[in-house]
Image (cartoon, helix red, strand yellow):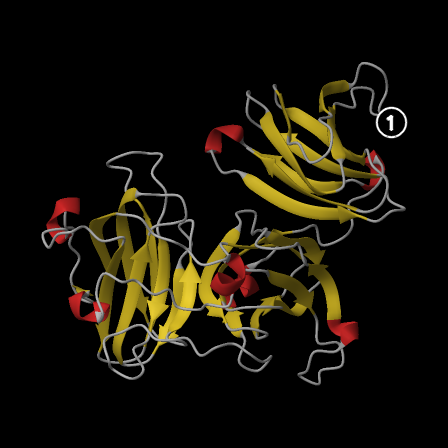
Amino acid sequence: MKVKIRSHLEGPLTIQDEASFQALEPRIFLSAPKPLRSAMQLHVNTAFAIDGGEISTHPPLSPVAYFYLDLPSPKHVIINAYGSKDYDHDLPDPILELIQDKNANSAVDKGEVLVVANNEISIAKTLGAGRWFFRASLPAGADYTPFEVRTSTSDPIEPPTTFRKSVFWSASQSVSAAATTPLSADYYNTLDATDNHYYAVKFNHRAGLRAYLDLMYANVDLQLIKDVNGNGKLDQSDILISSNRTRNKTDYVNTVLDPGTYLLRVFSTGVISPYHLQLSAVTAPAVDPGSSMATAFDLGSFDHGAHQPQMYMSSMSPSNRRDYYKITATDLDGAIVTLNSLEGDVDIQVIHDTNGNGLPDDGETVASSSNPGLATDYLYFTNPGTYFIRIYRASDGAATYQMKIE
């Protein structure tokens, strides 16, 4: 269920200093002593749109707009506000706040602003039954912006604050040797200050996992965990990978995992912040791809004309310099291969072993790509036949990559 509202704001606004804003201190607007009384309703079971001029019929135009949502029962609510592109593509996005009028005085008092988001970041939170308010206001330096508000509701989500309460991504169990099309899931929630949220994945087959944490208002970090001793608690030895980029920069985990159950930990070191966690998984070779043509991992036959792309993830240890894959192209157009370096720098060659000696001789490399760093490598080869894909490290240390064949 989704709700869409358009409005427009105009007028000067003084934003508090960043420290106060980070501490979620409510801002005081002098235009109305009890501003929540003028809030406009977001209808839970109706989708509609109102043009910008429709909510500015009570002059003077205000630098803020208030909305409310009546929930007959607890719901997980996702709401965001952004500058309407119907007017101007360069207009700024408004600041959005979730407000709970705890004392029912129709004013915004200290402690009643629960969550703040900007730059089109969604506020996502499970809310109890009752009336909830949202405030959209101009960002610093802006004097006008039309905007849209989008809202959706779903079943309530218990805050996944412990291993036992973790949100389980059941689709992860579907990764198998044949799962060459990535599976993905998106989670939107709000993290309370100094809290933890856990998301569990279970792989029955070796798999490549990619996790991205973004759309944060404040600093939120990400960890990959395996409960090694099974005590249901976070121990230092349980942490496999940490991503703790500063401020609200995107955190990520790219890794290849053996069968087992793993946890993604989303945690805050400061103030309340909304966030978006995207998980994706795809098959990885059940055994490490060989380092020569004789031990190459056999991908079987591939028909370019069938239009069924295949994707794989794998990794190289610091002692492993190259991976070989064997593929038999059955279509006259051969195949297209895209290689993404997720960690480290890996490059790619396609070899046609015409003399059958199991070695890459001169003249047998039919295509290659060696873009530096994390830049994507791309190549194609034509004609049916058996080929070897050679992926090799161009940097020191471990490497993780994702290969797509289409």
* Residue at x-position 53% and y-position 80%: 165
* Residue at x-position 75% and y-position 48%: 315
The C terminus lies in which quarter of the figure? top right
In the rendered image, residue 18, in percent from the top left (x then y), is placed at: 52, 57
Is 130 or 289 nearer to us in this picture? 130
Q: Residue furthest top?
A: 363
In the rendered image, residue 282, in percent from the top left (x then y), is placed at: 59, 52
In the rendered image, residue 140, in percent from the top left (x then y), is placed at: 41, 48
Instruction: Say what secondary structure mark 1 lies in.
Output: loop
Identify whether 73 is placed above or below 242: below
Q: Quarter of the image holding residue 31?
A: bottom left
Identify whether 332 is placed above or below 405: above
Q: Which residue is mark 1?
A: 359
Crowding near pointer 1: few (<14 within 10 Å), some, many (20+)?
Answer: some
Let me know if residue 95 appears in the view.
yes
Identify whether 376 is placed above or below 181: above
397 to the left or right of 270: right
Is 100 or 371 nearer to us in this picture? 100
175 to the left or right of 7: right
The N terminus lies in which quarter of the figure? bottom left
169 to the left or right of 236: left
In the rendered image, residue 352, in percent from the top left (x then y), is placed at: 74, 23
225 to the left or right of 13: right
Is 124 or 381 nearer to us in this picture? 124
Let me know if residue 390 appears in the view.
no
Kind of residue at disc 1 = Leu
Q: How many marks?
A: 1
Q: Residue furthest front?
A: 30
